[in-house]
């Protein structure tokens, strides 16, 4: 069995598979925020938010900086270019297969209507 291994993609998709983490990304898109303010915003414990932030950091989607007692989060510089390219390539593949299926169905319907007319 052939396995496709791409750790950066795996980390990104795993990080983005959770609605809370996607919400954190959306929130940080509006501006930097402390872990405490994010925890308040998402109504969760500080420990729970730290775990979500760690997953996003491992994926390179978020970076944190500690100044005094406050840890501030911001979007990482890596972005999602590779992930978007992967999704686009597979979207095109699915689209091509669905178009081919549509053609087969159209042909079958045409053949069925030709036979019933005879």
Image: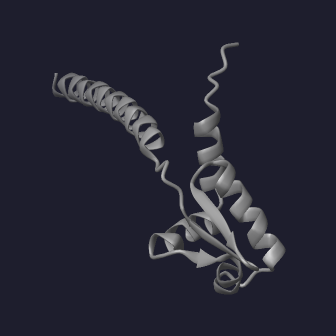
Quick check: 73 above or below 113?
A: below
Residue 107 spot, x, y in % from top left: 24, 24
Give whichever of 113, 10 is nearer the camera.
10
Q: Is residue 69 left or right of residue 116?
A: right
Quick check: 51 above or below 36?
A: above
Residue 11 spot, x, y in % from top left: 65, 43
Write down the quadrant of residue 91 in the picture. Answer: top left
Write down the quadrant of residue 35 in the picture. Answer: bottom right
| Residue at the extreme top | 1
Quick check: 2 above or below 94?
A: above
Q: Residue at x 31, y 26 (%)?
A: 100
Give whichever of 101, 3 is nearer the camera.
3
* The N terminus: image quadrant: top right
| Residue at the extreme right | 47
Residue 24 spot, x, y in % from top left: 59, 70
Q: Is residue 52 left or right of residue 107?
A: right
Q: Residue at x 53, y 56 (%)?
A: 76
Q: Is residue 36 left or right of residue 8?
A: right
Give whichever of 107, 45 is nearer the camera.
45
Residue 73 spot, x, y in % from top left: 61, 69
| Residue at the extreme front | 68
Q: Residue at x 68, y 49 (%)?
A: 58
Q: Is residue 37 left or right of residue 49?
A: left
* The C terminus: image quadrant: top left
């Amino acid at each position: 069995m052939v396995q496709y291994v791409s750790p950066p993609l795996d980390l990104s998709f795993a990080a983005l598979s959770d609605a809370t983490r996607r919400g954190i990304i959306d929130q940080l898109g509006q501006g930097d925020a402390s872990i405490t303010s994010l925890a308040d915003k998402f109504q969760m414990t500080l420990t729970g938010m730290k775990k979500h932030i760690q997953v996003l950091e491992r994926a390179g989607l978020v970076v944190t900086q500690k100044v005094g007692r406050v840890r501030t989060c911001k979007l990482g510089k890596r972005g999602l270019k590779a992930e978007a390219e992967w999704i686009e390539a597979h979207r095109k593949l699915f689209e091509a297969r669905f178009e081919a299926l549509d053609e087969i169905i159209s042909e079958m319907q045409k053949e069925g209507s030709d036979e019933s007319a005879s």
